[in-house]
C-alpha cells in the first residue's frame, strides 16, 4: 500500500467509525509580501483551505496584509524573532535571563502593532519562534492580552494555562537538521497518521514558506486534495480560537 493510500484510508476509517478528522495549517516567519509567500497563498486561495499565518510583529511590512484574503488569520510569531538564548539554552526569543515583566511588555506592544496592521485578521494567539516558551512566561500570557498559544507537539509544551487555549502543530515538513529541505512524502504522511491516532484534537501542519521548494508546494497541494476527498476537514484559526 502506498503512503498516500494509507493516509486516505486512515481518514476514511476514522470517518466510518464516527470520528471527524480535523486538520489545520500554520505557516511561520511571515514579514513581507515575497514571491515565496505569494506561492503559498496561491495554493491556499486556490483550494479554499484556511491558513494561520504566523507574522513577526516587529518585522511586519504593511503591504503584507494587503494580499491576505478570506480564511487567512494572523498569529503573533514572537516579537522580533531574535535569538536571545544563553550559553546553555537552545534557540529562543525568551531566555531565562530576561525578566518576565520585560518579556510580557514586549509581547503586549507587539500584539498591539499586529492588531493595528492586520485588523480583524489578527488573533491574540502566540506562536513563539523555535516553538519554545518558558513555562513561567506561558502562565502569564493573559497579562499581555494573549489568549492562545501554538507550539510544536514534539517539543515540550507548557501545561494548561487558565485563559489560554493551546492548540499545537504536529507535522513539520522541513528537515531542519538535514539541509532544510523537504522531509519527504512518506515521512510527512507517517507523522500525520501517527498524530491522527494519538492527538485528541485537530492535527496541525506546520510550514515555513521562505525555505520551501516546489516539491513542498506540490506535496501540500496533494495533501489538501487527498485529505478532503477522504473526508477530512480543514479548520480556520478563528474556529480554533473563537475568543482570541
Image (cartoon, grey):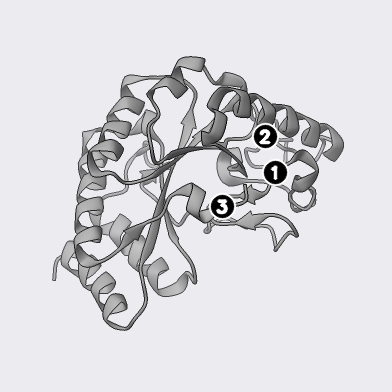
Q: Is residue 14 above or below residue 7?
A: below
Q: Residue at x 58, y 45 (%)?
A: 131
Residue behind mark 1: 146
Q: Are marks 3 and 2 in contact (CB under 8 Å)?
A: no
Residue at the spot 57% in from the left edge and 22% down from the top edge:
117
| Crowd tier of the residue under label 3, counting other residues whose Cα lies within 10 Å: few below 14, some 14–19, many 20 or above | some
Would you say 172 lies left or right of 213 here?
right
According to the picture, the residue beneath numbered tag 2 turns out to be 93
Name, please, the residue furthest toward the left. 1
Q: Quadrant of residue 130?
A: top right
- Where is residue 57? Give x, y as percent: 60, 26
Looking at the image, can residue 81 be seen? no
Left or right of 145 in this view: 1: left
Q: What residue is pinned by disc 3? A: 241
Of marks 2 and 1, the one in the foreground: 1
Position above or below: 167 against 50? below
SS class, disc 1:
loop
Amino acid at each position: 500500500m502506498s503512503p498516500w493510500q494509507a493516509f486516505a484510508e486512515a481518514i476514511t476509517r476514522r470517518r466510518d467509525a464516527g470520528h471527524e478528522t480535523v486538520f489545520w495549517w500554520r505557516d511561520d516567519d511571515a514579514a513581507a509580501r515575497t514571491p515565496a509567500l505569494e506561492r503559498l497563498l496561491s495554493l491556499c486561495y486556490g483550494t479554499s483551505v484556511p491558513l494561520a499565518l504566523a507574522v513577526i510583529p516587529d518585522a511586519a511590512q504593511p503591504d503584507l496584509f494587503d494580499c491576505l484574503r478570506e480564511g487567512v488569520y494572523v498569529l503573533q510569531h514572537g516579537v522580533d524573532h531574535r535569538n536571545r538564548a544563553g550559553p546553555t539554552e537552545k534557540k529562543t526569543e525568551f531566555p531565562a535571563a530576561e525578566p518576565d515583566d520585560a518579556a510580557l511588555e514586549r509581547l503586549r506592544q507587539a500584539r498591539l502593532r499586529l492588531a493595528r496592521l492586520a485588523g480583524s485578521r489578527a488573533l491574540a494567539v502566540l506562536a513563539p519562534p523555535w516553538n519554545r516558551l518558558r513555562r513561567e512566561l506561558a502562565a502569564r500570557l493573559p497579562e499581555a492580552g494573549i489568549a492562545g498559544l501554538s507550539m510544536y507537539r514534539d517539543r515540550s509544551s507548557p501545561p494548561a494555562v487558565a485563559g489560554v487555549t493551546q492548540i499545537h502543530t504536529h507535522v513539520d515538513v522541513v528537515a531542519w537538521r538535514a539541509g532544510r529541505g523537504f522531509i519527504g512524502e512518506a515521512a510527512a504522511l507517517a507523522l500525520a497518521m501517527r498524530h491522527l491516532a494519538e492527538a485528541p484534537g485537530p492535527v496541525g501542519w506546520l510550514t515555513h514558506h521562505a525555505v520551501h521548494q516546489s516539491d513542498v508546494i506540490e506535496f501540500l497541494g496533494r495533501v489538501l486534495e487527498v485529505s478532503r476527498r477522504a473526508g477530512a476537514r480543514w479548520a480556520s484559526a478563528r474556529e480554533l480560537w473563537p475568543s482570541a
